[in-house]
């Protein structure tokens, strides 16, 4: 079982390296080259990095708050890490299934703030 996990991790690292190599060669294509350069330069802009740092800080703060409020009621919020992942999934994927067992007035109040 540990060998399978090590193999999966190795494949994940190799796939990431292939994607990075692909982006490097994408610059050579006339139509996609400027797009790739623009995306890379924008993602490394200090303003964007500051925004991401603030966003992650707020997300972590809400994860701690939701863990304290709902940790004993919902399995998705039993640890801070699981709470962080659940809030990320709720924010970007719209998966609200983990909140079905909560009292409606409490969950509505917290998510109105979130």
Image (tube, grey):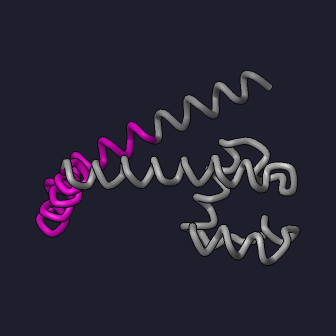
Residue nearest the viewer, comparing 33 with 46: 46
Examine the image and state in which quarter residue 79 appears. Answer: top right
- Look at 75% across and 22% down and name the residue there: 2
Asked if residue 67 lies left or right of residue 55, the reply is right
- Measuring from the top left, give residue 47's x and y in whole percent: 21, 53
Asked if residue 97 lies left or right of residue 31, the reply is right
- Look at 72% across and 22% down and name the residue there: 3
Quarter of the picture containing the N terminus is top right
- Look at 30% across and 42% down and name the residue there: 21
Residue nearest the viewer, comparing 108 with 26: 108
Examine the image and state in which quarter residue 113 appears. Answer: bottom right
Q: Is residue 28 magenta?
A: yes
Residue nearest the viewer, comparing 30 with 79: 79
Asked if residue 51 lies left or right of residue 34, the reply is right
- Look at 65% across and 52% down and name the residue there: 65
- Measuring from the top left, give residue 34's x and y in whole percent: 12, 63
- Measuring from the top left, give residue 87's x and y in whole percent: 62, 59
Please identify the residue farthest to the top as the structure is shown. Answer: 3
Q: Where does the magenta region start and end?
A: 16-45
Examine the image and state in which quarter residue 104 appears. Answer: bottom right
* Vertical placement of residue 55 versus 30, above or below: above
Magenta span main SS: helix
């Amino acid at each position: 079982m540990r060998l399978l996990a090590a193999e999966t991790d190795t494949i994940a690292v190799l796939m990431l390296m292939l994607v990075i190599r692909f982006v490097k060669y994408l610059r050579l294509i006339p139509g996609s080259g400027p797009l790739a350069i623009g995306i890379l330069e924008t993602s490394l802009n200090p303003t964007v990095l500051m925004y991401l740092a603030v966003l992650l800080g707020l997300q972590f703060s809400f994860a701690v708050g939701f863990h304290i409020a709902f940790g004993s009621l919902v399995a998705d919020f039993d640890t801070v890490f699981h709470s962080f992942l659940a809030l990320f999934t709720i924010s970007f994927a719209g998966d609200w299934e983990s909140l079905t067992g909560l009292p409606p007035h409490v969950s509505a109040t917290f998510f109105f703030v979130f």
